[in-house]
Image (cartoon, helix red, strand yellow):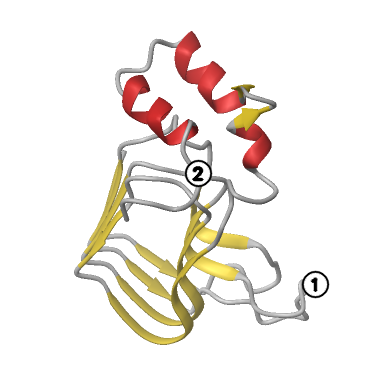
Amino acid sequence: CVWHANLFSDLAGEVDDSGAWYTSGGYVRRGHLLLGNTFLRVRSTAQTPLGFPHVMGIYMDDLASGVTILNNTFSDGDIGVLLGGGRDVHISGNVFTNLSTAIEIDDRGLSYEAYLCIFNGTEGAYAQALRAIHYQVFLQVLEVLISPIMAQRH
């Protein structure tokens, strides 16, 4: 999907662990392009259950992969982009102003999400899903699943 020239404004004020634009699904759901969008005042304004603001302009949750984030503007918010592990995310030409954090990358896949990738030497849920649909880049992704599962190629 292509998301182009949209305004995401004054969102997620009363929630936590959320984003104006959200995707998950590990290595399977690829191909999104976010181009020339504006993320304005995407932030939590209420008491935050996690103890700190955790609202993102773009939230790439649970090893989300294969997304291009190009020439967007993030202003006056909590976190511009959160990469929750994943692979093959390209971020270029974006402008980040007045945010708590511009880009945050965490260690999903090495920690609590590792079971999705490999469990006791067998294929995890993501590898099984890719094999079941004969996914065109399965061999490339399989290489990811047998190596340490940390954020790479961003």
Residue 144 vertical placement versus 6 (above, below): above
Q: Quadrant of the N terminus?
A: top left
Name the one closer to the observer, 46 or 133: 133
Left or right of 11? Residue 111 is right
Name the one closer to the observer, 9 or 123: 123
Residue 106 vertical placement versus 124 (above, below): below
Provide the secondary structure element on which disc 1 rests.
Answer: loop
CB-based contact (under 8 Å), mark 2 and mark 1: no
Q: Which residue is mark 1?
A: 49
Amino acid at the residue labelled 2: Pro
- Residue 125 image position (x, y, % from top left): 61, 24
- Residue 77 image position (x, y, % from top left): 49, 80
Q: Which residue is mark 2?
A: 148
Write down the quadrant of residue 102 in the picture: bottom left
Amino acid at the residue labelled 1: Pro
Say which label, 2 or 1, has the lower sequence index. 1
Residue at the spot 32% in from the left edge and 45% down from the top edge = 88
Measured in 3D between alpha carbons, the distance from the residue under mark 2 to the one under mark 1, in whole angstroms, is: 31 Å
Left or right of 49? Residue 72 is left
Name the one closer to the observer, 78 or 149: 149
Residue at the spot 42% in from the left edge and 35% down from the top edge = 144
Write down the quadrant of residue 58 in the picture: bottom left
Residue 28 vertical placement versus 13 (above, below): above
- Residue 63 image position (x, y, % from top left): 51, 45
